[in-house]
Image (tube, helix red, strand yellow):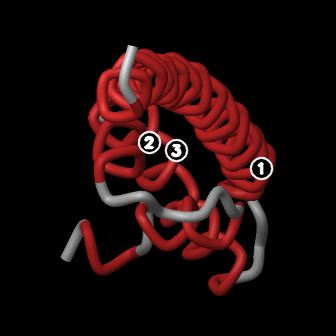
Amino acid sequence: MNARTFIIFSIVPLAVGLWVSQTISGQINANAQQAMYADLIDQVIACCDAKSTLRSSRSEKLRQAAAIACLKSAYLKNYREQIIEEMVIRHIRPSRARVQAVGSVNNYV
């Protein structure tokens, strides 16, 4: 066996093995990211639902904040799966602030 044949038979399987392992780890990372995004969205929904209890407050500002929280919660509940898909596609770093920005008041106006 000459050197060229030895290199081909040793490097090709190594390259294929690396490619397969990266593909599998990428799928695992995507699933982990989706779970993290889902958890973050659930946390934001819970906070919005808690804030929406202020609808009957005597303060006008608190009632407005409660109304916005209701809209944000409804938006995140309705579009939860699409939001997760877009965040994975765009490789957005998992962050509660980024999830909150998705449901910002600008989306409703």
* Res 76 → quadrant: top left
Q: SS class of the residue under badge 1?
A: helix
Secondary structure at numbered mark 3: helix
The disc label shown at residue 47, or none: 1
Say whether residue 44 is left or right of residue 101.
Answer: right
Label 3 with label 2: CB-CB less than 8 Å:
yes
> Mark 3 or mark 2: which is in front?
2
Crowding at dot 3, Cα within 10 Å, few <14 / some 14-19 / many 20+, comes out as many
Left or right of 30 in this view: 58: right
* Residue in the foreground of this view, choosing between 91 and 60: 91
Disc on res. 76: 2
Estimate the spatial distance between the alpha carbons at disc 1 and disc 2, rounded to whole Å. 12 Å
**Amino acid at the residue labelled 1:** Cys
Tell me the tag on residue 73: 3
| Observer-nearest of 73 and 7 | 7
Q: Secondary structure at mark 2?
A: helix
Quarter of the figure with the C terminus: bottom left
